[in-house]
Image (spheres, rainbow, N blue to C red):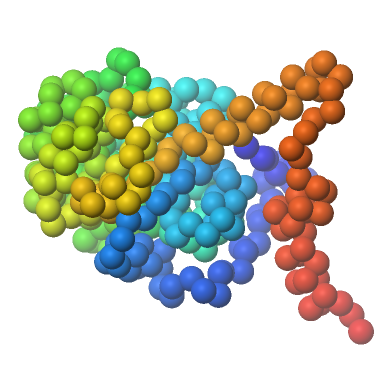
Amino acid sequence: SISRAPSVTGLRMAVPPRPLNPNAPKGSSAARLRLLLDKPGILTMPCCFDALSARLIERAGFDISFMSGFSTSAAKLGLPDTGYISYGEMIDAGRDIVTAVSMPVLADGDTGYGNAMNIKRTVKGYAATGFASIMIEDQVSPKRCGHTKGKNVVSRAEAVQRVRAAVDARNEGADILILARTDARSVLGMDEALERVRLFEEAGADIVFLEAPESIEEMIMHCQAAPNTPKLANMLEGGKTPILPPAELDKMGYKIAAYPLTLLSTAVSAMNKALDDLKHGREVEGLLTFPELRDVVGFDDYYAEEERYKLK
């Protein structure tokens, strides 16, 4: 990820917020996400890991994004998604992301970083940062990527308690949607995962997510388990879940099609190719022109704004 230069005091310099997209719906990020969820059709959601990736997603015309814990841990820390990244580091990365874009951004809240009271604090902190939704899951801490080995889940009672704590924080004033996730499929089986989805819906979750179903039949069961709540499908290339077109996911009953690692994987592949070319003295191909790159990172917007404040 891209870091900014420190100020003379050693603290990071504040970045002025970018102007909102004039075509974006009005209201808070959470309110705008609710409007999108109420509209017909599926939402395709590429996942981001820093301000630049989020900005590219918005420039490409997508309505929402999700700050991926896997990708943010990789980009910010250079470490795997195995519980290394902290609440504070996620908030720090998230602040950069939500400042850079006007679209609603959902975010990975892992296990909530502690007990029920910690979860409520986490939900309120994510809301204050400007996220539209926070994902809370039922893994044992330290958690890990849902498509990797070694994960475990808490009891059904504790899983539901986590969601209830998050919902309570929302109902007490945190302007944010609750995305409740279960990883029970790979650990305790599909029946337990489906029961947790049902209970999450009953507890008041705004969106439900059953991680890593292993067949189309299981994906359909997921949608049937929570008929009154928007559902998220995780389209992780090379993972356990079948990769299906958004239109097919829409017919199944999904509302969001998430692509958690597509941009990170694409970026790493492109950087590795460029580095190999440089190492062997070859010209690097496929680069943006310098004017294109300046536009992507905001120079054109800066110059336009600068004109407004020129002294006559």
As drawn, the residue found furthest toward the right would be: 312
Quadrant into which the C terminus falls? bottom right
Viewer can see residue 32: yes
Viewer can see residue 161: no
Q: Is residue 233 above or below residue 279?
A: below
| Residue shown at the point (59%, 51%) measured from the top left | 56
Q: Nearer the viewer, residue 41 or 290?
A: 41
Q: Nearer the viewer, residue 48 or 69?
A: 48
Quadrant into which the N terminus falls? top right
Left or right: residue 36 versus residue 190 is: right
| Residue shown at the point (51%, 74%) measured from the top left | 23
Left or right: residue 99 versus residue 8 is: left
Q: Position of residue 113 (x, y in %)?
A: 33, 35
Give the image quarter of residue 300.
Answer: bottom right
Q: Position of residue 131 (x, y in %)?
A: 42, 55
Give the image quarter of residue 6.
Answer: top right
Q: Is residue 239 above or below residue 244?
A: above
Left or right: residue 155 versus residue 6 is: left
| Residue shown at the point (77%, 59%) measured from the top left | 299
Q: Nearer the viewer, residue 293 or 120?
A: 293
| Residue shown at the point (30%, 42%) measured from the top left | 233
Q: Position of residue 146 (x, y in %)?
A: 32, 27
